[in-house]
Image (cartoon, rainbow, N blue to C red):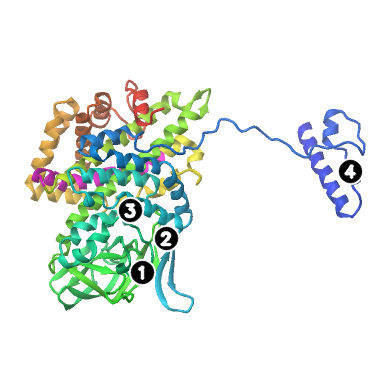
Amino acid sequence: MDGFKAIWLLYWSRIGKKMDRADGFAARPSKVRPAASIAAGIPFGPSVSIPLTIHTHTVTNQVPPLLDYDAFATDRALTEAVTREGAAWARAALADYGCRVGGELLALGFEANRHRPVLRTHDRCGHRIDEVDFHPSYHALLRAAVSAGVHSFAWRDPKPGAHVARAALSYLHHQAEAGTSCPLTMTYAAIPVLGRSQRVREQWMAKAISAEYDGRHVPAAQKGGVTLGMGMTEKQGGSDVRANSTLAHALGGDEYALVGHKWFFSAPMSDAFLVLAQAQEGLSCFLLPRWRPDGTPNAMQLMRLKDKLGNWSNASGEVEFNGAWAQRIGDEGRGVATILEMVALTRLDCMLGSAAEMRRALVEAIHHARHRRAFGKLLVDQPLMRNVLADLALESEAATVFAMRVARAVDASPRDPREAAFARIATAVGKYWICKRAPAFVNEAQECLGGAGYVEESILPRLYREAPLNSIWEGCGNIQCLDVLRALAREPESRDAVLAELAASAHLDSALAREVETLKGTLSDMKDIEAGARFVVERLALVLQAAVLLRAGNDALAHSFCRSRLDGRHGLAFGTLSTDMPFAAMIERAWPA
């Protein structure tokens, strides 16, 4: 009570002095005895000075910001996977980009998400312009990524391992900023589709794989490099693209006029878009540029930008086509078949993006735990926290190595039929499981920081908003599981490729061997399996992750994964590993001290 009284008296002594000055008098002695003199026993008088600054506390036990770190060299799971999956020759490029990701690009990512894109449908004179304005940081991020080949590394230097190297670049870039990954992924995935039309290939291919970024709103003919977007889904159909109602009216040759809409139009400031529309022979694939060949704006109108949960730096819109000029790619009625290879590549990037978000969240959690003290110890030395961090490290590495293994399968597909068959199933399996795990993983990392992980000064709220996106984009969970079932039932070579992948590692761990045998029995009778598809795909994902970890050669980590994920020695939440597992080694491997 005495302390409160002293503060109260000090407050009123200051108010009294302000009132004296406001009355126009010279500073007069306050009629309230200063609290400082009361506390110190000093006689009250007009010459006594009163301290006006109070230090309420000393700030201690704070975690230093994580700045300027090497995102490639510190990620042992990634560096080892790059070598194991055939891209060791690209380590120099990856090392350079890893340093940028942990420094300048990370700072740009915060700015790009703080300043969201804005749609301008008309200029000041009332002319229709349909432009989206982005913050300069967004363009700076894309310029860095394009120059490094995040969108085109595999196409500019197409030797064995190129897709693995490109996957590693995408994984690194996503840790700095996820929104810009959208146009980068779509440009990367669109390249095989462009190659299906000689005319389109000649007009667009070189600029689509260029190392030059040009964000200006001008025709592609005036640019040295372009980006590509996508518009597949409509209001009435969503993932069921065969229900699309947009019509393509033939103009002659491969030219068409499109009339209709797209409910989700990704990266609307791209230079051209792959879209699906109904031609005379059925659903077909088209390339629709922002500008007509004569240099005038194409007949597409951006109706609005989506107000999204996350992915704030990137624009997604709704668009209407009013006779928009487009070029057909592939045969009429073969639209879905034409874009299938693109879908495999976008699914790969969904896996990589979710794995990257897990990795970035894990780094934040371990960094915090190594510098924050509670109850007399660093958090990283608290037994229960060590369990949580080790479990997150295990999950993160399993996601990373499986995504990179799928990247090798994609890379080898043109040369190896079995790898192509494996990729057909593995992309859907990984897209389902890794993307499904990301939201819960990021939330657990937030808990490691407590309230500090819930405020925007941290990157974790942004990661948490971003985490659900990859499980939704390119087909939600049910779509992936149904795709796996179709491949297992209709493509025996895909089923055989998966079983061969598992057989190569099953003998290395008894829990894996038992699970593989159980899975074989399940896959031998596919009748009435649809309702249980999620369980089947989940178990398939876990055994494939285990197989890759075992072949990678870190026995302690791989067997810990098999015990916890396959042998039932794990709860439903993170941080429920058996207490005899090597927690300290797992944490140190994940983020070297």
Of callouts 3 and 4, the N-terminal one: 4
- The residue mark sitting in front, 2 or 3, is 3
The mark total stands at 4
Label number found at residue 210: none
Secondary structure under the numbered disc 1 in the rendered image: loop
Q: Would you place residue 266 above or below residue 372 in this image? A: below
Q: Residues within 10 Å of mark 1 (few under 14, many from 20)?
A: some
Of callouts 3 and 1, the N-terminal one: 3
As measured in the structure, the alpha-carbon distance from the residue carrying label 2 to the one carrying label 3 is: 27 Å
The disc labelled 2 sits on which kind of residue?
A: Asp
As measured in the structure, the alpha-carbon distance from the residue carrying label 4 to the one carrying label 1 is: 70 Å
Of callouts 2 and 3, the N-terminal one: 3
Q: Do labels 2 and 3 touch, CB within 8 Å?
A: no
Label number found at residue 307: 2
The disc labelled 4 sits on which kind of residue?
A: Ser
Q: Which residues are magenta?
A: 415-444
User: Which residue has dot 1 on it?
Assistant: 218
Q: Do labels 3 and 4 touch, CB within 8 Å?
A: no
Question: Quick check: can you spot residue 309?
Answer: no
User: Which residue has dot 3 on it?
Assistant: 146
Secondary structure under the numbered disc 4 in the rendered image: loop
Left or right: where does residue 470 sit relative to residue 532?
right
